[in-house]
Image (tube, grey):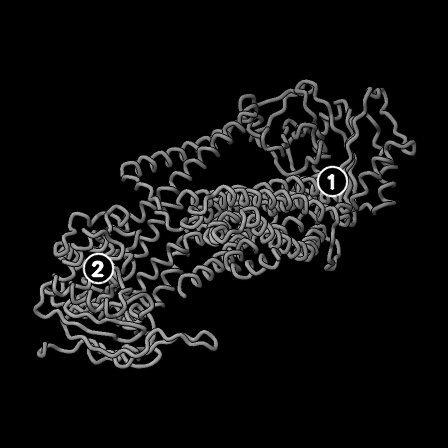
Amino acid sequence: MYLKLALRNIKRSAKDYVIYFVTIILIVMLMYSFLALGFSDDIISMSENMSMLTTGMTVFSVIVSLISSYIVSYAVQFMLRQRKKEFAIYELLGMEVGTIQKLFFIENSVIGVLAFGIGIILGTGIVGILAGVVKSIFQVPHTYQILFSSEAFVLCVIFFVCMYGAGIVRAVRIIKREKIVDLLYDSRKNEMFSKEISTRVQFVHVIFGVLAIVVGIFLIGEGMSQQSNATWIYLVASVILLLVGLYDIYRIFPIMMIKFVKKNAKMKYTECNLFFLGQMGHRIQSSGRMMAITAILFTLSLSTMFVGLLLGAGYKANMKVYYPYDVGVAIDAPFTKDSLKSLISFVDSKCPVQDDNIYYLYDVDEYSIDALALSDYNKLRSMLGFEKVEMSDDEYLVHCDTWNYTREIEMAMKSQHEITVTGVELYNPQSKIYQEAMEQFQMAGTNGYVLVLPDHITSNLPANKIRLVLKLENEGIAELRSEIRRYLNSGEWVAEIQEGEELPEQVTIGVTVQAWGVSNSLTGFTSISFCSLYMSIAFILLSCTILAFEQLSTLDKNRRSYQTIDRIGVSRTMQRKLIHLELATFFFIPFVLPAIVIFILMLSAQSLYSSYIMQENIILLYGFVTIAIFVVIYYLYYVTTCFLYRRNIIR
Amino acid sequence: MADKKELLKLEHIQKWYDCGENATKAIEDISFSIQEGEFVGIMGASGSGKTTMLNCISTIDTVSDGSIYLEGLDVTAINEKDIASFRRENLGFIFQDFNLLDTLTVFENIALALTINRVPVKQVDALVQKMAEKLNITDILEKYPYQISGGQKQRCACARALINNPKLILADEPTGALDSHSAKILLSTIRRINVEFGTTILMVTHDAYSASYASRILFLRDGAIFAEIQKENDTQQVFFDKILNVLTAMGGDACDVS
């Protein structure tokens, strides 16, 4: 009986439920598809560290469900407001409060279960697409597959019950608390208008906001120049200041705009502008805080999405920089070069070797720095396709591809023009530092920098560290790293020590394989970009829902306003235009800030980092991808809200 | 009265609502006319068809049969596209619940009627000020509706209705939401508008005292005109008594005569 009544009620108030319903579907779909991706055996088995995706998705799902529970209770309360009168009539007719609560609970449960089911079905479809995207990132051949994950499903059920249950229980409690008279006449209550903020106070707010932003930007600059943990303190303080400043300006700016436009008689008294300005002024007054908060939420979401995608992309695109050699073996022991010949044969049996280079890093005790012979340095350069370097017998040069040491080394070279190695004075006439990517985990120097000395000097230095770099015919396979490690640690490999040298107590062996690095970086890329996508889309969905409900909750009041202008002769066409304009402005205001911030982010990322990221135009591409995702979701909510709003107002 | 022009004419209008097999008749058959400058009251019990009739005249609702003419123009034949301009150029409305926009000040509420009618911007200020003086609301022009009393709100609504010099003012229970003191002031104002500006007014009311301000009253019962009385040279008290007599003859339950 109750179920029948509840179903009939749902059917009747379908228009109130539609945005709520769609949001729940989208959240469940999002949660399930990302969780299922994180739990997919297919995906996890693609790389060693892929389980970080699973952890990331689970942690973010907790955050998403916490925020969603707030939205659910907001939405449920909105629907409660729409139907207070109906509940009051049930009570007047003698229905017990408990029964009404039960009815409301059943109604919402039916909607919840239905939305959850649809969300899971859609999510199952989406996860196939997401898995395809991940596979194409890893360049693994794939076809579309429908994936169902029982772990993801169970987690979704738990999160959903928590977030949805909390929302409904709150609403059901409200029904019990309210008196019939309040339920019955709730819509007739006088609307409280908050007092208009005076021009003087507005200016104080603007000055405060601008100051906070300026100080925030200054602190970012300061923080970036610090090379210690204090950077974080600066960054946190600057983020807080920027957010407070933006919120303050965002809250006041639309009020000032309306005031400014109203001062222009021509603009104000043209056709229905007066009505529009009145509507907007009131909206900004009553929902300004929410609009400012939504704008900041959007900005954070979009920035997260953009930075996430970019970090991921940068990670992927820069792998060639991090791993310039196909294989690099670093052994900090005075072995002979012949010792590594068997290793080359071993690798060749797994992946054909195209070119090899075995060389030493020499100890320069005077400066506690490693040195590289010029001939070895040039061989490495030619392997990597860089030009050869020439220098005379009394010169030296520095190679440093770790940016944070560059400035210090430059200053040291300026203050001291010559160095003395084995009693010979060497110069670096132009104080030049070579910065091409050659380091690959101690292959050229152990601290990210190395002295390059003429061969006649290095021949007199102790060669305590041996290095091997290989160029492979087909870039190799990720498993090569563990194979080489296994080979070096097994008894198969026998190493000889140089004459007169001793084996140190502990021998450090480092093996780097480009194919392994790329595969791992892809894991990083996938995890960072997918987690940021997940969070940001969830945030955008939830913020859009708040915006839409904020609009729909003013329906009753606005219907009266539009009826009034209808009677005094405003045509239906004009009314439709006004509704569009009103909603577009309401949706546009929170869009301005994120749009500006993303634009600035794109430009600054392009000018600062484009030279570090090898893939051309990737910053702009991801900027536009971010904006496109946002615009599509935003537009969907705008159109639905517009449709519902118009249908309710112009009957 | 003979030298005055006929402004509004209703010819055998009928209105019924279809509810499946049963059609409910709201207006049986009504015909009457109003001369320019007249102040006509429409009285009747709930369900007598007075509000339906007013809605049909104001083009908010359509008739099922018959015609309504305003200065010879058949209102029922105006197409959807032209209805809004017809309304704003010819009619003024005063509602029981004021229908002022809460988001605008009193000044802006009145000015809105002008701007919708595309009155040149330069004239807006002066016209609103002039109308506000006539209705004695100059000192509340910058206030919002929620800051003023019911009587003031209704005078503001009157100003908005009059500002475009409409041919006909339609008032639907204008004193319905006012206390007796405010109602008296408003009714005097409406009468003054009628006498001084020669504005034609059609007022629907179920209150005999309010109706006594009119110059002619039509009594509706069950969707048809039951009776019609003229004030002519009677005092307001005499006219009021006449109204009560008709109401008694109609059954006595049509209104509150206390």
Whether the residues at callouts 2 and 1 have beta carbons within 8 Å, the answer is no
Q: In this view, does A512 lie to the left or right of B129?
A: right
Q: Residue A642 carries which label?
A: none
Q: Mark 2 points at which residue?
A: B160
Where does residue B107 sit, x and y in percent of width and height? 21, 53
* Secondary element at image label 2: helix
Percent across and percent down for residue A544 are: 50, 51
Q: Nearer the viewer, residue A535 or A11?
A: A11
Q: Which chain carries label 1?
A: A
Q: What element carries label 1?
A: loop
**Relative height, residue A210 to residue A332 (above, below):** below
Q: Which of marks 2 and 1 is in front?
A: 2
Left or right: B8 as drawn, with respect to A26? left
Of all chains, the one bearing label 2 is B
Residue B117 in sight: no
Numbered label attached to residue A49: 1
Q: Is residue A418 left or right of residue A42?
A: left
Question: Three-letter amino acid code at disc 1?
Answer: Asn
Label 2 packing within 10 angstroms: few (<14), some (14-19), many (20+): many
* Quarter of the C terminus of chain A within the rendering: bottom left
**Do marks 2 and 1 share a chain?**
no
The quadrant in which residue A494 appears is top right
